[in-house]
Amino acid sequence: MPLLDFRMTQGAFALDVKLDAATGGVLALFGRSGAGKTSIVRAIAGLARPTAGTIKIAGRTLFDSAAGIDVPATQRRIGYVFQDARLFPHLRVAANLRYGQARAGRHGKGIEFDAVVDLLGLRDLLARHPFGLSGGERQRVAIGRALLAQPDILLLDEPLASLDAPRKAELLPYLDALHVRTKVPIVYVSHALDEVVRLADTLAIVDGGRIAACGALADVMSRLDLRPLVGRFEAGAAIDTTLLRHDAAYALSYLAFGDSEMAVPQIEAEPGAFVRVRIRARDVLLATQRPEGLSARNVLAGHVVDLIPETGAYAELAVVVGGQRLVARITRAALDALDLALGSPVFAVVKAVAVERIVRSRDSSGRNAG
Amino acid sequence: MPDFTQAELAAIGLSLRIALTAVAAALPPAILVAWLLARRDFPGKALLDAAVHLPLVLPPVVVGYALLLLLGVRGPLGAWLEAQFGIRLVFTAAGATVATAVMVFPLLVRAIRISVEALDPGLDEAARTLGAGALDRFFTISLPLIAPGILAGAVIAFAASLGEFGAVITFASNVPGETQTLPLAIYAATQSPGGDATAAKLAAVSLALALGGLVLAEAIAKHMRKRFGR
């Protein structure tokens, strides 16, 4: 995975990037448009040149200004999937797919044509020219083409950004399966938090040409100090859980995390499945006593571990429940009325219907734990 | 089908040969210059651009005269060519070819430059990340994609080559069987008594070749557009 420490200027924009994400899996580079995400992946791929510093990927030094190392883009073995796919218009899909494969030479990783074609559902497209493909199909071909070049790492630069909602929904399952099935580490660039929560294991937040934070997705998501960068509306915790059982009578499913459990609308998966839930801060109520006669299904006991009393109407709190952090946004008036402070025991109330559920494969759960 | 005399057939054959050779010879440097003008910034770029276009705006006779000064027997380049290689361009088919190539060069550059400018540089970046070196990228990505421009330019240049008159007659003169191409033969025929039939026949051939060239160029462009979906 990337080990970045470099400076770069892009016109008037200066980047100072320090990133050490040694965990493997899917690393998301998240940030607003213009934060410098694309510049970072272009530097990794060798399409843009830092002024100074080092870039190391998968144990290989690709750039080191002090040592005079600057591996050309053609030799970097970095799979780059561009936002606009960039398929070669004069070549059929099959020839596009084989373009990088034919030039991979000796450093083959055993990523095979048929496996990639099946993984990305490209079988029926092979004989077609790129111009007849939909946006989602183009991106799938672009991903396949990059994979078949046998890369050490795959960079996906906002692959969904140019697609409409139905095309996004069509492509997302392929992205889910991508790392799990190929084992190629992925850097996923996005400004859409829902994509990041769905796909990433590690989250790096890019802001103003710098890495503002980097860590496990759940940890970074629940950090209150990063709220302004994530966006208030989107803010919330991501918690990895295991599916315990279904309640068929009420069409509910129960999820376990730490020593707590939570009811959510029924999930289409077998017990034991790995489920990531996203609970937005604005959907969490706090109570100092266990509330009775409530419609909300989930009343979770915990205590306050972090607290930002803003000057406006809101206050942000982080509450540890079952070993996982939840984030709650309440009014400042409520904060004072309930007399909440660091360490205060609280009950977090979460409506089952407000929980966003993402079923992930067992492989990624296993990797996540490791 | 009208009957052609030996001399008329010679003029037609010579015209085709000179036009083909001139276009073929001018094509590689035209691709290079079009590429430089479309993609690179360098000192003297405006000057190169202007120099390339000169044959288009100068009277062809002036171009022929300039070639005579440069490549003539006493010209600096002409004297060197003759001393080193024994090549004499004045009054030869080779000279007519050079004059024709210089005249159609700007047509080629313009057509190719437009397709180079329309080429998405992002495709080149994509090919780089896929491990393709510079020459590899040129031949597998750029060249096929600018091929429609090259072909269209080449066909137009070929048609124009068949009609090149001023520069050829000034530089290479009007030698039957050696430098007397179609337009020169037509000119000679109109100058001689009883040459009307020859002039008319050769003019008809010129018309047919030019028209055929234009139709072919359009057909190629259409086919390419369809293939690339643009």
Image: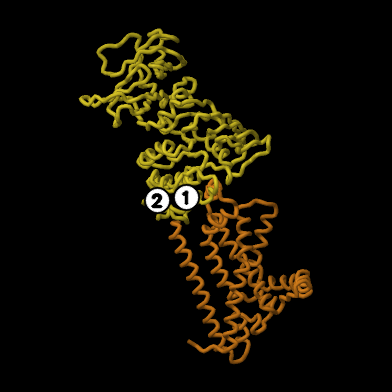
Chain colours: A yellow, B orange
Tell me which residue sits at (61%, 83%) in the image.
B185
Residue A340 vs residue B72: left or right?
left
Residue ID for mark 1: A87
Residue A204 vs residue B41: left or right?
left
Indicate the secondary structure of the residue bearing disc 2.
Answer: loop
Crowding at dot 1, Cα within 10 Å, few <14 / some 14-19 / many 20+, comes out as many
Q: Are marks 2 and 1 in contact (CB under 8 Å)?
A: yes
Subunit bearing disc 2? A
Towards the viewer: A152 or A212: A152
Residue A314 vs residue B29: left or right?
left
Tell me which residue sits at (37%, 27%) in the image.
A276
Tell me which residue sits at (71%, 71%) in the image.
B67
Residue ID for mark 2: A133
Label located before the other in sequence (2 or 1): 1
- Under mark 2, the amino acid is Leu
In the rendered image, residue B115, in percent from the top left (x then y), is placed at: 54, 58
- Under mark 1, the amino acid is Leu
In the rendered image, residue B149, in percent from the top left (x then y), is placed at: 53, 62
The mark total stands at 2
Residue A31 seen anywhere in this rendered image of the structure: no
Tell me which residue sits at (47%, 71%) in the image.
B215
Subunit bearing disc 1? A
